[in-house]
């Protein structure tokens, strides 16, 4: 468990903090565990049983997310809980921006092991307002990508974003609504192709170091003037 040095209301839980199951601890962390321990544990189970495993509809071999197992193994799979419900998209984006700044301090890109780090901000109070989560993600992406960061939305809608290898697959389904912060990786190119600013940010980070299976895609993009 990690508490923000300047804001004790901001707490990050690791999977190890949730074992054994049941309410535990005092103060803010104990309160969050008592109120939202079930949601936190559900997300860890989802990560292990869905993200870390193959899926018949994925369209390729390997785990749904190739990075989650290493993140869990290294204690870099960090979860925050936003209790209640933000007043709107603007308030939600402010919360995520604070976690983004904290993420940059905890896992600077210059440190290679940071690429396995992620912060999942659980939004249990927004289960009936998934459109606001999607809107916040779209707005935040323009802020995150120039800094070499990605922001993803997950919920049981599920988000209407198709898989890269199977257009009929919707991979972003999760048991608890959330927004997820992580570093951009070289295989993110297909998620950045439709926006010139996003593509420029990708090129600044990776230059010509594009994965072999994406080189043809990269070469198909008209270079910016």
Image (cartoon, rainbow, N blue to C red):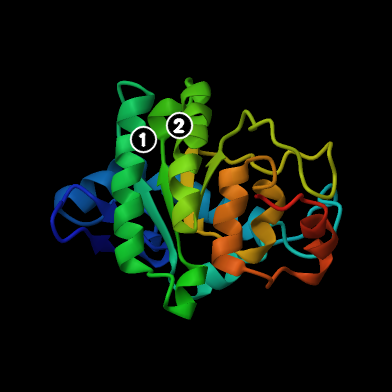
Residue 153: image quadrant is top right
Query: Residue 143 location, x and y as percent?
Result: 43, 44
Dividing the image into 4 quarters, which one contains the N terminus?
bottom left
Does the residue at mark 2 contact the one at mark 1 (Cβ under 8 Å)? yes
For image coordinates 75% across by 69% down, the residue present is 211
For image coordinates 79% across by 53% down, the residue present is 55
Is residue 177 visible to us here? no
Query: Residue 167 location, x and y as percent?
Result: 83, 39
Question: SS at mark 1?
Answer: helix
Question: SS at mark 2?
Answer: helix
Crowding at label 1, few (<14), some or many (≥20) Cα neighbours within 10 Å? many
Which residue is more in the foreground, 127 or 93?
93
Residue with the mark numbered 2: 136
Which residue is more in the foreground, 180 or 175?
180
Query: Residue 113 location, x and y as percent?
Result: 47, 78
Is residue 25 visible to us here? yes
For image coordinates 36% across by 52% down, the residue present is 100
For image coordinates 76% across by 44% down, the residue present is 163
Mark linked to residue 93: 1
Using residue 12 as the reference point, say whether residue 54 is left or right of it.
Answer: right
Query: Residue 63 location, x and y as percent?
Result: 73, 62
Sequence-wise, which precedes: disc 2 or disc 1? 1
Residue 16: image quadrant is bottom left
Crowding at label 2, few (<14), some or many (≥20) Cα neighbours within 10 Å? many
80, above or below 86, in the image: below
Which residue is more in the foreground, 146 or 61?
146
- Callout count: 2
Using residue 210 as the reference point, say whether residue 13 is left or right of it.
Answer: left
159, above or below 104, in the image: above
Task: Give the CA distance from mark 2 to mark 1.
Answer: 6 Å
């Amino acid at each position: 468990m990690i508490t923000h040095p300047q804001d004790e209301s901001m707490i990050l839980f690791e999977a190890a903090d949730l074992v054994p199951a049941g309410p535990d601890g005092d103060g803010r962390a104990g309160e969050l565990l008592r109120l939202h321990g079930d949601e936190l544990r559900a997300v860890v189970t989802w990560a292990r049983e869905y993200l870390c495993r193959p899926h018949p509809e994925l369209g390729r071999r390997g785990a749904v997310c190739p990075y989650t197992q290493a993140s869990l193994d290294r204690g870099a799979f960090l979860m925050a809980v936003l209790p209640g419900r933000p007043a709107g998209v603007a308030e939600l984006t402010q919360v995520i921006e604070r976690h983004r700044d904290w993420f940059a301090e905890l896992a600077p890109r210059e440190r290679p092991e940071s690429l396995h780090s992620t912060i999942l901000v659980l939004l249990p109070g927004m289960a009936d307002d998934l459109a606001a989560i999607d809107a916040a993600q779209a707005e935040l992406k323009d802020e995150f990508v120039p800094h070499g960061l990605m922001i993803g939305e997950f919920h049981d809608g599920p988000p209407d974003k198709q898989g890269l290898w199977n257009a009929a697959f919707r991979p972003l389904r999760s048991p608890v609504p959330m927004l997820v912060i992580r570093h951009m990786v070289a295989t993110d190119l297909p998620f950045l192709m439709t926006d010139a600013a996003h593509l420029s940010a990708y090129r600044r980070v990776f230059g010509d170091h594009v994965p072999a299976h994406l080189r043809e895609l990269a070469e198909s993009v008209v270079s910016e003037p």
